[in-house]
Amino acid sequence: MATTTRAPADACSLLDADHRNVKKLFKEFEPLAESKAKSAAAKRRKLADQICLELSVHAQIEEEIFYPVLREVIKEEDLLDEAEVEHASAKDLIAQIQEGDETDSKWCAKVIVLGEYIDHHVKEERNEIFVKARAAKKLDLVAMRDSLQARKEELMAEMQATA
């Protein structure tokens, strides 16, 4: 019997599924950060590359689709401004990780700090932004989910092709 994966209920659910997925990747990374083994360095790089890819695509779909639509329907400009500033800081760390050397101890620290930073960002999205999005009457979060998913698939294919 084939198992079917149900699509997330709405845009917020889809974005939150991304959050959970990247959280698992950070959890896998943590014990590798402690290891001095050469094999651990290769595993660290592979996991960090996956984390960076997932976060880059996630940030882009939020910035292209989710946040602009939210700006039209909710009045909390400061909340969305903060989210976009957090994205900019995360992108800076992502660039440093992508360009860095996985055998450098500060490189591991950057990945760990990125994980902590993302945890903070996710809490704000879950507790504030998603709540306001779901309460907005003029917002079709189911249709937005489909747009987000399509763009995510497009970006993943593009970024994996250039990796």
Image (spheres, rainbow, N blue to C red):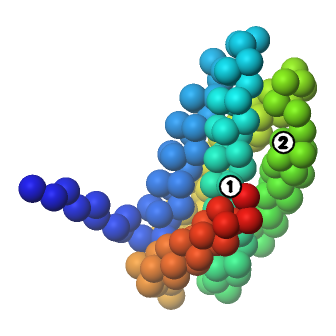
Q: Are marks 2 and 1 in contact (CB under 8 Å)?
A: no
In percent of width and height, residue 21 lies at: 51, 46
Image-based side of 107 in relation to 3, left or right: right
Front-most of residues 69 and 49: 49
Image-based side of 99 in relation to 39, left or right: right
Up the image or down, 152 lies above or below 20; here it is: below
First reached walking from the N terminus: tag 2 or tag 1? 1
**Image quadrant in which you'd find residue 41:** top right
Residue for badge 1? 53
Amino acid type at image mark 1: Leu
Name the quadrant of the C terminus: bottom right
Look at 44% across and 84% down and name the residue there.
143
Q: Which mark is residue 34?
A: none
In percent of width and height, residue 128 lies at: 60, 57
Look at 77% across and 72% down and name the residue there.
77
Q: Residues within 10 Å of mark 1 (few under 14, many from 20)?
A: some
Give SS at disc 1.
helix
Give SS at disc 2.
helix
Amino acid type at image mark 2: Ile
Look at 22% across and 61% down and name the residue there.
4
Image-based side of 39 in relation to 132, left or right: right
Confirm whether residue 67 shows in the render: no
Front-most of residues 60 and 51: 51
Q: Residues within 10 Å of mark 2 (few under 14, many from 20)?
A: many
Residue for badge 2? 97
